[in-house]
Image: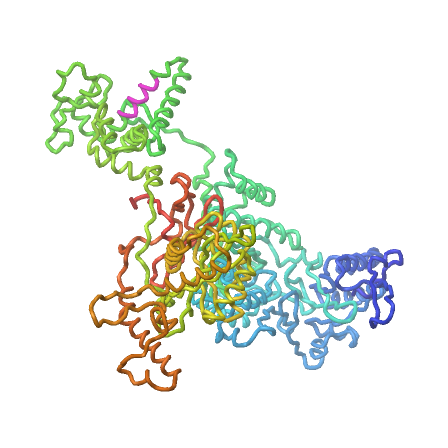
């Protein structure tokens, strides 16, 4: 198509390029005289020229011009026509108009033999030629679907040519990259398969939550879902849908029925389904199609009382909207699937009402798109939603909403009428099918493609709208009801408040409003006292209503009364007080001698206790008890104070401390016996150390490699902390000790040391470069979590031993390079000569096992051959002798050293594991407690024993990755 459009000479320089056939020729300058593939302007210019050529014939062929301008998708054209004669005329007119513009029309296909016979054979497609011979027609690709003209049905292409068969068959576990390729290969532009395709997107989203790499294989939990998804994929390939709306299934009987449908491509599935494939590429390859039917379809008498029904729903995994047409044809209710949209829920946690609102926006946008493209007269639109919250949001114009809700409610208000929104129970909401991560294919074939069953009934049987009252009478009847209410004035509900003073101020506001209405000016202090009396009387009436009624009647309290020992009475203000025995103490205030009685379980009493707790600066509970008793007698006061303090968020944050899980089992690297030393090693840095070079002083750093199995060390001296220096130190160590299989080190800017100067020095080290160097030599490099030095205790403890030895040996403050290298070698020998097992003082006992036994053959020098029992030690074959010595040391290591690792030295108790959603404090020993970041646990990573040892915490400053020992849970609700 592009090459048929010429470019004006003055515009050809925009497509200028340089060329020569070989390097010896001079460079020549060329310009393109026609549109080319790859230029951003080519699609627009091609469509503009196509339409400009067609508009020259608006007066003579308006229908053909409309088809060319409105029914083309790029160079593809699809259209449904009323009868065969109209289709034949349309083919001729469209062909002539394009020929006048220099475009050749090819690859015509139709579901009518008469139309196919009217088209020149050389312009027919291969499938149409076969149809002409044996009256059969294979499937044709149409806007991502497969059209079967012989039966006028649509199918789906699930043949993946570039994907291995074993992946599609489910016999091979795919990677994340391969799974993405398969999921995105299912092209479903109209949403017929939304319940199926949304599952693939949810699985992809799960891989992002698990931080799976592109070339990592799917874990078991996702692979099981993947296998179920592949089983559904096989079912999708067998689905056939009627192209024509009027060929819809009868929902009541579940039978596919063809209504009046001429073979020439009548009243198609506008704008979603073709009837006649009309026009191919202008250059002679491909296919040009259209998506809109002729206006004559709009007058089809078979669509009586046409209604558009849209359903929306959302879950924590996805949100969806689906549209159906409903009409009456000769007294029979018919329905047809139009389109649907489904979106995966965002990774950021969002409330379900907000997701439901977003699904309602999808439904409004879908209705607007269908209304603009569909050339059928829609009498009424219905929007069905099962979220009462969204429906009340839509109908509430008296309050202002937050930005998120306000923007979406405004868009819904612009695109829809509020009267069109109705409530549907969740069980009847067909959009719910496309919000699940699993469904049965029966629901796809029955409910999803045919529509909900209740729409096939009369409108009187549809679900009632919860926003409309059932009684729709126009008159209102006034009924006077006389209630025997107490003479108390109403006060606010104490459960709605978290502060005693705020509760009193709210009651004061009510009293002030009453006084203003009565024209009375009241004193603020008097109103506070009056409000306190009101709330106390209300609390006592709710807690001791029967006892108060007994006292007012002048009777004695029953024996089962909780107030019997307090001798209660009602004062002049109607407040229940203690009638105690200390009235003789005249210097004591009346509130202390006759305190107000309150029930510790009542919310008012709890607010009062919390007020005194805060006044005591969240201090001693006994001080709170003493302060409250000066004015109030609270039943079960101490338990009430204890319960209130346990629920105080400030106290929870102040007292929160990390609860490490039980000490885990040793990793395989610590017990990997009968392997070469330094097969598993940890790396750490120490320093800086000053040396004298000429007349100046320079800094040197030590790189400590620790064998995690035999606890041997290897020290390398580096002149600077750069990536290249670290790589060279690693290669020097590997040249002497062999390349490790697994390397562990601290986290941070990599190899973070404890000294401030060392922290600044390691900022330029590239983590990825070190990993790449290790991988190139068959080693894997792992980093422990941030701020978790106990994860690297195996090498942190030896850093301390090396520093202790250096302080003993290093006499000069700044030795020369050669002296420092010698000292580090001596320190290495000293540390490697330390005993790993118990040192016996008994005569004749064997020497204690040391790391040097595995490196040198003895604790400090070459092995001394004595009167060993094993004859292999005196053979001439030295390699067998060395092997035998190593075996003996490893047997002693297993027998003497390994049992010492059995007991857990700390963290022996079982703790409640951290869970997603827990409120925690990220402990930082270097910062004060009030400076610890607060956040919510976003993700947990259990260890091999199932206990959570690593968490991700979402804080105001971002997501922090910490070990469980550095996270302090804050108890919430009933956990305290």
Quadrant in the rendering for residue 802 = bottom left
Q: Position of residue 353 (x, y in %)?
A: 47, 46
Residue at (32, 41) in percent of width and height: 655
| Closer-to-camera residue (353/250) | 353
Residue 885, picture quadrant:
bottom left
> Where's residue 667, x and y in %?
36, 65
Residue extending farthest right: 9
Task: Tell me if residue 875 can be seen.
Answer: yes
Give the quarter of the figure containing the C terminus. Answer: top left
**In this image, 904 relative to 333: left or right?**
left
Instruction: Give the residues in magenta.
Output: 527-536
Q: Is residue 731 left or right of residue 507?
A: right
Instruction: Give the answer, above or below, for where 59 lies relative to 889.
Output: above
As rendered, which of 269 and 551 lies closer to the eye? 551
Q: Where residue 249 sits: x, y (%)?
A: 54, 64
Asked if residue 614 is among those painted magenta in the image, a careful observer would answer no
């Amino acid at each position: 198509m592009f090459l048929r459009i010429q470019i004006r000479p003055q515009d050809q320089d925009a497509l200028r390029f340089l060329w020569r056939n070989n390097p010896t020729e001079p460079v020549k300058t060329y310009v393109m005289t026609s549109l080319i593939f790859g230029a951003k302007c080519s699609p627009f210019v091609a469509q503009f020229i196509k339409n400009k050529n067609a508009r020259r014939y608006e007066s003579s062929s308006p229908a053909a011009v409309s088809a060319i301008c409105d029914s083309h998708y790029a160079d593809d054209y699809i259209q449904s026509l009323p009868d065969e004669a109209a289709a034949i005329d349309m083919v001729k007119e469209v062909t002539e108009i394009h020929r006048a513009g220099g475009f050749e029309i090819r690859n015509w296909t139709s579901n009518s033999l008469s139309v196919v016979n009217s088209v020149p054979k050389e312009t027919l497609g291969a499938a149409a030629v076969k149809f002409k011979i044996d009256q059969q027609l294979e499937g044709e690709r149409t806007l991502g679907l497969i059209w079967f003209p012989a039966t006028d049905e649509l199918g789906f292409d699930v043949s993946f040519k570039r994907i291995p068969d074993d992946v599609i068959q489910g016999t091979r576990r795919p990677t994340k990259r391969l799974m993405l390729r398969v999921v995105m290969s299912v092209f479903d532009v109209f949403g017929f398969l939304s319940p199926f395709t949304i599952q693939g997107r949810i699985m992809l989203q799960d891989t992002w939550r698990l931080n799976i790499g592109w070339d990592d294989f799917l874990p078991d939990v996702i692979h099981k879902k993947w296998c179920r998804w592949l089983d559904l994929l096989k079912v999708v390939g067998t689905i056939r849908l009627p192209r024509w709306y009027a060929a819809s299934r009868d929902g009541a009987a579940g039978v596919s029925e063809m209504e009046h449908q001429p073979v020439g491509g009548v009243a198609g599935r506008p704008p979603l389904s073709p009837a006649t494939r009309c026009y191919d590429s202008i250059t002679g390859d491909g296919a040009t199609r259209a998506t809109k039917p002729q206006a004559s379809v709009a007058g089809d008498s078979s669509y009586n009382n046409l209604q558009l029904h849209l359903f929306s729903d959302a879950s924590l995994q996805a949100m969806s909207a689906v549209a159906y047409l409903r009409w009456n044809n000769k007294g029979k209710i018919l329905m047809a699937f139009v389109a649907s949209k489904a979106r995966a829920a965002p990774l950021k946690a969002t409330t379900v009402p907000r997701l439901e609102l977003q699904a309602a926006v999808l439904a409004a946008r879908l209705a607007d798109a269908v209304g603009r493209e569909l050339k059928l007269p829609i009498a009424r639109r219905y929007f069905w939603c099962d979220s009462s919250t969204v429906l009340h949001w839509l109908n509430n114009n008296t309050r202002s909403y937050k930005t998120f809700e306000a923007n979406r409610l405004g868009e819904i208000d612009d695109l829809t009428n509020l009267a069109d929104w109705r409530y549907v129970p969740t069980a009847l909401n067909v959009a719910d099918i496309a919000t699940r991560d699993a469904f049965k294919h029966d629901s796809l074939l029955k409910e999803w493609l045919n529509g909900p069953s209740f729409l096939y009934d009369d409108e009187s049987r549809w679900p009632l709208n919860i926003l409309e009252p059932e009684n729709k009478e126009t008159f209102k009847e006034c009924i006077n009801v006389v209630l025997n209410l107490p003479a108390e004035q109403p006060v606010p509900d104490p459960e709605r408040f978290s502060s005693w003073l705020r509760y009193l101020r709210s009651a004061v506001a009510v009293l002030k409003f009453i006084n203003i209405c009565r024209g009375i000016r009241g004193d603020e202090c008097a109103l506070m006292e009056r409000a306190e009396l009101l709330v106390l009387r209300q609390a006592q009436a709710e807690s001791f209503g029967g006892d108060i009624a007994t006292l007012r009647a002048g009777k004695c309290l029953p024996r089962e009364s909780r107030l019997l020992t307090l001798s209660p009475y009602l004062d002049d203000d109607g407040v229940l007080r203690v009638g105690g025995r200390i009235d003789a103490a005249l210097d004591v205030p009346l509130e202390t001698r006759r305190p107000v009685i309150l029930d510790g379980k009542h919310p008012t009493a709890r607010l009062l206790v919390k007020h005194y707790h805060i006044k005591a600066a969240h201090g001693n509970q006994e001080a709170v008890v003493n302060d409250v008793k000066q004015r109030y007698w609270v039943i079960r006061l101490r338990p009430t104070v204890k319960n209130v303090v346990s629920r105080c968020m400030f106290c929870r944050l102040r007292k929160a401390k990390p609860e490490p899980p039980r000490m885990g089992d040793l990793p395989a690297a610590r017990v990997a016996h009968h392997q070469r030393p330094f097969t598993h090693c940890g790396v750490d840095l120490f320093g800086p150390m000053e040396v004298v070079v000429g007349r100046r002083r320079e800094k040197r750093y030590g790189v400590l490699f620790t064998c995690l199995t035999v606890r041997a060390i290897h020290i390398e001296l580096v002149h600077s902390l750069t990536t290249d220096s670290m790589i060279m130190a690693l290669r020097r160590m590997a040249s002497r000790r062999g390349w490790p299989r697994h390397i562990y080190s601290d986290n941070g800017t990599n190899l973070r040391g404890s000294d401030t100067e060392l922290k600044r020095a390691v900022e330029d080290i590239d983590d990825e470069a070190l990993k790449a160097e290790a991988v190139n030599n068959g080693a894997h490099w792992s980093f422990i979590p941030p701020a978790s030095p106990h994860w690297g205790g195996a090498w942190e403890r030896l850093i301390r031993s090396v520093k202790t030895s250096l302080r003993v040996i290093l006499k000069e403050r700044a030795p020369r390079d050669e002296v420092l290298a010698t000292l580090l070698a001596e320190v290495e020998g000293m540390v490697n000569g330390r005993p790993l097992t118990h040192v016996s003082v008994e005569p004749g006992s064997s020497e204690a096992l040391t790391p040097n036994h595995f490196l040198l053959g003895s604790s400090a020098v070459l092995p001394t051959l004595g009167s060993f029992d094993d004859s292999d030690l005196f053979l001439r074959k030295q390699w067998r002798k060395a092997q035998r010595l190593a075996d003996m040391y490893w047997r002693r290591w297993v027998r003497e050293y390994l049992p010492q690792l059995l007991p857990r030295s700390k963290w022996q108790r079982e703790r409640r594991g951290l869970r997603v959603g827990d409120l925690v404090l990220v402990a930082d020993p270097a910062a004060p407690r009030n400076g610890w970041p607060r956040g919510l646990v976003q993700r947990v990573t259990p260890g091999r024993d199932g206990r959570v040892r690593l968490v991700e915490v979402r804080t105001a400053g971002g997501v922090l990755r910490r070990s469980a020992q550095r996270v302090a849970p804050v108890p919430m609700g009933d956990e305290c």
